[in-house]
Image (cartoon, rainbow, N blue to C red):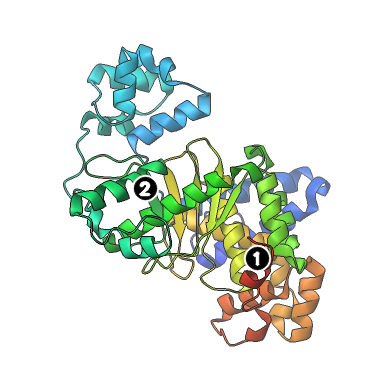
């Protein structure tokens, strides 16, 4: 194929053209010539640079940076004593109860290879002024009671309400101080008024995941790859695909929880890791369609693969809301490519001349459900009326409920 002149990406068209070429080169596998392998590496660097600039990631929290480095090197709290002085100080610092001294910052920077700029933020353990005390009465208490998450509390006093809700949250391992929860939520933008509902929902997801942990195998991060996503995507070809996919993920150590979203949160899914390191994917099934189920599932798996590093970060997703977060762009791209590689899509009759026949033929060729081809058409054309009856409406809940999921 004719090659573009290699240069820094400046436009979205150049970015997409490079993605097309990368996909073609990757598809050649071992047949790549040395020159082609070099070009693939250069293009990958340019694409990554463009994505990093367009979708910048916020700088890491200092304590999160230390915890990440500990996990990366297999360190325990006792291994930090040389930097902090005593085991109690290590615990206090990691729990944000004690600030670091200049000497400690210098020692940690040299010993763990974390920049001093990142660690400076640990000099003050007080919460930012804009963070306010937790108002436990703002949790969606009535909805939590109606769903059977907590006992009825209509006649209880406010302090009893706080104790009950606080206990529910704490049981899920969502540590909190006076001013904020330890687990951070990121992803689709959420208003402050929905934060309480998000934490309540998250606590429910974690509890359910732990109750079903016996179904989950041992997780190995090395198992996740583009091939893993592709294999998962092709399970959509089966009429029992959603069941097969959930079983496959659980066998590979990833817990899958189906939990409807709470009012006002507008969630499609979430990705996180529990305190024991078990990856958890939560799906709300708020749109009971096959295309939505499959794309959300692979999007969250991509987050587990690429973006979830510890047990204090959770990515929550409203896939109907655009985001400038680079992680969301990457998860979307990985999911799309697993279903329909861009190089194939742009040359397919389903894209050039969409009809039931061309849609079904492309789906057959890729061994994916036709709803995913229609979903791609909807996203790129903006015409959501096209072949709407092929999306698999009301099929997911019926299938999963028939098996007691």
Residue 9 visible in image: no
Q: Residues within 10 Å of mark 1 (few under 14, many from 20)?
A: some
Label 2's element? helix
Q: Which residue is drawn at 23% across and 26% down?
A: 99
Q: Position of residue 103 (x, y in %)?
A: 26, 16
Give the mark toward the camera: 1 or 2: 2
Nearest to N terminus: mark 1 or mark 2: 2
Against 337, residue 29 (above or below) is above
Q: Where is residue 255 in the image (x, y as percent from the top left)?
A: 59, 48
Look at the image and tell me in which quarter the C terminus lies. bottom right
Q: Residue at x 23, y 20 (%)?
A: 102
Residue 77 occupies quadrant = top left
Residue 327 visible in image: yes
Q: Position of residue 227 (x, y in %)?
A: 72, 50
Look at the image and tell me in which quarter the N terminus lies. bottom right
Residue corresponding to mark 1? 400
In the rendered structure, the answer to whether residue 257 lies left or right of residue 231 reads left
Q: Residues within 10 Å of mark 2 (few under 14, many from 20)?
A: some
Against 309, residue 335 (above or below) is below
Q: Residue at x 37, y 14 (%)?
A: 81
Against 375, residue 335 (above or below) is above
In the rendered structure, the answer to whether residue 42 lies left or right of residue 178 reads right
In the rendered structure, the answer to whether residue 149 lies left or right of residue 72 reads left
Residue corresponding to mark 2? 168
Q: Looking at the image, which residue sits at the far front?
A: 155
Label 1's element? helix
Q: 191 or 181: nearer the eye? A: 181
Q: Are marks 1 and 2 in contact (CB under 8 Å)?
A: no
Q: Which residue is drawn at 68% across and 75% down?
A: 371
Q: 3 or 117: nearer the eye? A: 117
């Amino acid at each position: 194929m004719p090659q573009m002149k290699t240069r820094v990406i400046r436009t979205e068209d150049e970015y997409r053209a490079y993605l097309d070429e990368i996909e073609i080169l990757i598809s050649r596998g071992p047949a790549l010539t040395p020159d082609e392998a070099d070009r693939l590496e250069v293009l990958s660097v340019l694409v990554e640079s463009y994505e990093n600039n367009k979708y910048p990631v916020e700088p890491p929290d200092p304590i999160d940076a230390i915890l990440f480095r500990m996990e990366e090197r297999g360190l325990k709290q006792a291994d930090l004593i040389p930097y902090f002085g005593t085991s109690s100080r290590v615990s206090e610092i990691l729990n944000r109860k004690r600030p670091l001294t200049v000497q400690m910052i210098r020692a940690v920077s040299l010993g763990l290879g974390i920049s001093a700029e990142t660690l400076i933020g640990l000099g003050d353990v007080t919460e930012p002024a804009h963070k306010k005390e937790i108002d436990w009465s703002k949790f969606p208490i009535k909805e939590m009671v109606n769903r059977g998450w907590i006992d009825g509390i209509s006649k209880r006093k406010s302090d009893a309400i706080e104790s009950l809700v606080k206990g529910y949250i704490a049981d899920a391992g969502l540590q909190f101080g006076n001013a904020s929860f330890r687990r951070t939520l990121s992803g689709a933008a959420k208003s402050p008024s929905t934060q309480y509902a998000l934490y309540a929902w998250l606590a429910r997801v974690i509890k359910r995941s732990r109750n079903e942990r016996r179904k989950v195998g041992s997780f190995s991060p090395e198992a996740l790859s583009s091939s893993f996503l592709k294999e998962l995507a092709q399970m959509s070809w089966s009429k029992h695909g959603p069941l097969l996919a959930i079983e496959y993920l659980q066998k590979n150590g990833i817990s899958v929880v189906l939990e409807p979203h709470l009012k006002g949160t507008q969630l499609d899914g979430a990705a996180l890791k529990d305190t024991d390191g078990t990856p958890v994917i939560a799906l709300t099934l708020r749109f009971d369609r096959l295309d939505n189920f499959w794309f959300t599932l692979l999007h969250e798996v991509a987050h587990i693969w690429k973006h979830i590093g510890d047990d204090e970060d959770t990515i929550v997703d409203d896939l109907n809301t655009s985001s400038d977060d680079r992680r969301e762009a990457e998860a979307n791209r990985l999911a799309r490519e697993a279903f329909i590689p861009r190089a194939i899509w742009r040359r397919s009759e389903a894209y050039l001349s969409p009809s039931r026949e061309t849609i079904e033929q492309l789906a057959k060729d890729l061994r994916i459900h036709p709803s995913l081809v229609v979903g791609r058409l909807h996203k790129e054309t903006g015409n959501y009326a096209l072949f709407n009856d092929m999306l698999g409406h009301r099929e997911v809940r019926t299938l999963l409920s028939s098996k007691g999921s």
